[in-house]
Image (spheres, rainbow, N blue to C red):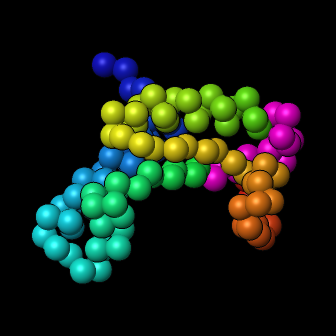
Amino acid sequence: MSLKRPYLAEEVSKKVKDTLIGLLASYRCADENLQPYSQSLFIENKPILLVLFLERKECLNQPNEFKPLANHLKLAIEQKTGFLGNIQVDVMNTLTVPPALGVNVINGAGNLD
């Protein structure tokens, strides 16, 4: 038996499924702490916005290097989560965050290898 390295799209889609299962359970049990989230999904039927924020080494983080990978991941995640309903996926990094999103990213001291 060979061990396969986990693929990022599979890991993300698994986390999305697990989160939705948790929200469904909280909805069915009328959990007040999670009610705003479960209500927007199960009563108001709002779309799910999934944003994967992915940072790589500086040279790989540049938009011309990053965008093909981001598009590939976006499509792979959409394919794996499509059966769950209206899920909108986006993959971005500090250099590709749309200004209209209003997100300010602070560069930390972390080491990206």
| Magenta highlight range | 53-65
Residue 76 visible in the picture: yes
Q: Is residue 98 above or below residue 61?
A: below
Residue 101 in magenta stretch: no
Q: Which of the 4 image quadrants contains residue 83? A: top left
Which residue occupies 67% across, 36% down?
A: 70
Which residue occupies 27% across, 58% down?
A: 42
Lateral position of residue 28 relative to residue 69, left or right: left
Q: Which of the 4 image quadrants contains residue 37? A: bottom left
| Image coordinates for residue 93, horizontal then vertical, percent | 73, 51
| Image coordinates for residue 99, horizontal then vertical, percent | 80, 60
Front one among 37 and 66:
37
Q: Which residue appears farthest toward the left when viewing the image?
A: 29
| Image coordinates for residue 80, horizontal then vertical, percent | 41, 31
Which residue occupies 82% across, 52% down?
A: 95
Q: Is residue 81 above or below residue 52?
A: above
Residue 54 in magenta stretch: yes
Lateral position of residue 22 relative to residue 5, left or right: left
Which residue occupies 44% across, 51% down?
A: 47
Q: Which residue appears farthest toward the front when viewing the image?
A: 44
Query: In which quadrant of the rendered image does the N terminus lie?
Result: top left
| Image coordinates for residue 113, horizontal then vertical, percent | 72, 48
Residue 113 visible in the picture: no
Q: Which of the 4 image quadrants contains residue 86? A: top left
Q: How many marks?
A: 0
Q: Is residue 77 above or below residue 31?
A: above
Q: Which residue appears farthest toward the bottom when viewing the image?
A: 32
